[in-house]
Image (cartoon, rainbow, N blue to C red):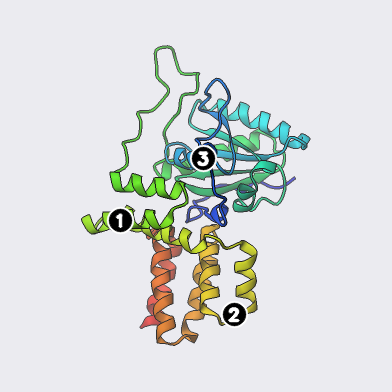
């Protein structure tokens, strides 16, 4: 049995590894996450093509994601257990079940070492939970911690669970719509047009230089554009075979950050920094500043890396 990992904090960046070499989707494929015929908002199916809607939902309520397979008896048992325990939370958690055989990008993005694996997404960011079968009381404890984590990050909504008291609407008021340029950028990212997303964010910044969400969104769109068309193996092999190749090291730092390995990404570039010429140092500094925005400027790992960069500069 794999011991569960308590959700002590967000992993920094949105886990974007699943978007590396993201396949082109037809309009029919790029639909919101599939749900059972009764339109259940609490327990539903998802896959590579539909996961964007689960990410968006994670900004309202923590999303528990189970990577399972029909051929795995443990998987089917765990999915049933998770469904029962999630429903008991009356809409404060939701469960997204992803068939691993149909969701290779999610398996890769969440770095699943076996099936079944359970992770969570809070505010668009991945939180590892556990793998394999766990007792109910252990899962309950993990869920309690997950709800606490969500509350710390302003994710404490509720969706219709079908168990509210009579006359009470269990669905929270709808989130306010995104500003038009932000919505344009989000839609562009969903269809894989990262340049269009970056353009929308740049326009938003030009209109309001204090728009911190647009600044972070631009950094994320740029990161996605740099990773597009590159595989994990290509990036890591290039970096390993050419440790002094700045482009290769920048690529693998992007990949590390996108997969939630925030400290690894920063350490790689900060360790390389003193060895570079003036032009190389400028490129690394600019890339780090952008990655700081993706990870979140208030993240303690960003604060520490920024302090280390300042010491190297001065």
Q: Say which residue label 2 marks.
A: 243
Q: Earlier in the sequence, mark 3 or mark 1?
A: 3
Q: Is residue 206 left or right of residue 7?
A: left
Is the Cβ of the residue at disc 3 closer than 8 Å to that at disc 1? Answer: no
Quadrant where the N terminus sits is top right
Q: Say which residue label 1 marks.
A: 212
Which percent across, then down, holds residue 64?
56, 38
Q: Nearer the viewer, mark 3 or mark 2?
A: 3
Q: Say which residue label 3 marks.
A: 30
Q: Earlier in the sequence, mark 1 or mark 2?
A: 1
The residue carrying pointer 3 sits among few (fewer than 14), some (14 to 19) or many (20 or more) residues within 10 Å by Cα, namely some
Q: Residue 71, relative to residue 265: is it above or below?
A: above
Measure the C-alpha gap from mark 3 to mark 2.
Answer: 38 Å
Q: Measuring 45% from the left and 28% from the top, which residue is drawn there? A: 159
Quadrant where the C terminus sits is bottom left
Q: Residue furthest left?
A: 207
Q: Measuring 55% from the left and 20% from the top, which residue is drawn there? A: 38
Which percent across, then down, holds residue 43?
57, 29
Q: Secondary structure at mark 1?
A: helix
Q: Secondary structure at mark 2?
A: loop
The residue carrying pointer 2 sits among few (fewer than 14), some (14 to 19) or many (20 or more) residues within 10 Å by Cα, namely few
Which percent across, then down, holds residue 238?
62, 73
Q: Residue 19, relative to residue 237: is it above or below?
A: above
Q: Earlier in the sequence, mark 3 or mark 2?
A: 3
Q: Measuring 58% from the left and 25% from the top, which residue is drawn there? A: 36
Q: Nearer the viewer, residue 170 or 190?
A: 190
Q: Secondary structure at mark 3?
A: loop
Q: Nearer the viewer, residue 88 or 262?
A: 262
């Amino acid at each position: 049995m794999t011991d569960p990992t308590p959700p002590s904090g967000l992993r920094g960046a949105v886990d974007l590894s699943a978007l590396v070499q993201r396949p082109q989707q037809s309009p029919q494929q790029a639909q919101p996450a599939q749900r059972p015929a009764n339109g259940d908002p609490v327990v539903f199916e998802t896959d590579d093509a539909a996961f964007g809607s689960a990410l968006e939902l994670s900004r309202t309520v923590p999303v528990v994601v189970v990577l399972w397979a029909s051929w795995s008896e443990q998987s089917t048992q765990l999915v049933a257990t998770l469904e029962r325990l999630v429903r008991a939370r009356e809409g404060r958690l939701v469960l997204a079940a992803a068939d691993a055989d149909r969701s290779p990008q999610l398996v890769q993005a969440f770095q699943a070492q076996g099936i079944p694996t359970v992770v969570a997404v809070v505010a668009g960011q991945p939180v590892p939970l556990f793998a394999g079968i766990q007792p109910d009381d252990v899962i309950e404890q993990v869920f309690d911690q997950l709800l606490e984590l969500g509350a710390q990050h302003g994710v404490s909504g509720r969706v219709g669970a079908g168990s509210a008291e009579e006359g009470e609407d269990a669905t929270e008021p709808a989130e306010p719509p995104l500003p038009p340029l932000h919505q344009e950028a989000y839609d562009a990212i969903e269809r894989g047009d990262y340049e269009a997303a970056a353009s929308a964010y740049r326009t938003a910044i030009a209109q309001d230089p204090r728009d911190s969400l647009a600044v972070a969104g631009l950094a994320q769109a740029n990161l996605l554009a740099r990773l597009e068309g590159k595989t994990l193996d290509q990036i890591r092999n290039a970096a390993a075979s050419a440790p002094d190749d700045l482009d290769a090291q920048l690529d693998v730092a992007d990949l590390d950050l996108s997969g939630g390995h925030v400290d690894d990404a920063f350490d790689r570039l900060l360790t390389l920094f003193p060895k570079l010429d003036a032009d190389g140092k400028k490129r690394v500094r600019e890339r780090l500043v952008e990655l700081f925005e993706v990870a979140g400027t208030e993240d303690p790992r960003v604060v520490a890396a920024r302090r280390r960069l300042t010491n190297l500069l001065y």
